[in-house]
Image (cartoon, coloured by chain):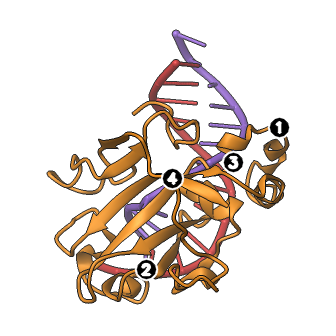
Chain colours: A orange, B red, C purple
Amino acid sequence: VGRIVEVEAYIGQDDLASHARFGPTARNRVMFGPAGIAYVYLVYGMYHCLNVVTEAEGTPAAVLIRAVEPVEGEPLMRAARKIGRGGGRARTLPATRLAAGPGLVGLAFGITRSDNLADLCDSESALRLECGEPAHTVVATPRIGIGYAPEPWLSHPWRFTVAGSPSLSRVRG
DNA sequence: TGAATGATGCACT
DNA sequence: GTGCATCATTCAC
């Protein structure tokens, strides 16, 4: 169990930073479907990124879960991290850093492409969203790792972080 | 403290 | 064949 403390929004086919910018493909087609479904993809050949599909059917959009603050199951996350690259360090890592990045969220929670299409709003689902404490202060900054995108998409402040969380993917910004 | 780089597999042109 | 919605390590300062 973890608290989501950092996300990024990708919305519409005209968002030139989004996987949906070229229209529906085999990989991104879930983004065009109904909201509340998981969109999981492999990035850089090593890491799985978890997204929550949003918006009405036909409008491609998703929210990338970029960082999570562990709440329960820290030992499980630590064990899961050992599977990945640099996993030897998971033993001494502070709990707050176990899922402090999109690739690390996938690793710590054992998310793979078999979780693609999971219904995140179903309470029976192994991978699901639950209601939690609202963030006190949210800070918006430009999205990360989308250098291929032209302006204005490159600079749109569509990365949202819980101010002061020790589990953000980047301590600054 | 920060920049450069390799790992690694698959979607897409 | 090219290029990633990344991360850990290495190297320079």
Q: Amino acid at mark 1?
A: Thr
Q: Amino acid at mark 3?
A: Leu
Disc 2 vs disc 1: Cβ atoms closer than 8 Å? no
The disc label shown at residue A49, or none: none
Residue that mark 4 sits on: A133
Residue that mark 3 sits on: A98
Cα distance, mark 4 to mark 2?
19 Å
Quadrant position of residue A35: bottom left
Chain letter behind tag 3: A
Q: Secondary structure at mark 4?
A: loop
Residue that mark 1 sits on: A92
Badge 1 and badge 4 both on one subunit: yes
Residue that mark 2 sits on: A36
Which label's residue is closer to the chain start, 4 or 2?
2
Image quadrant containing the C terminus of chain A? top left
Q: Secondary structure at mark 2?
A: loop
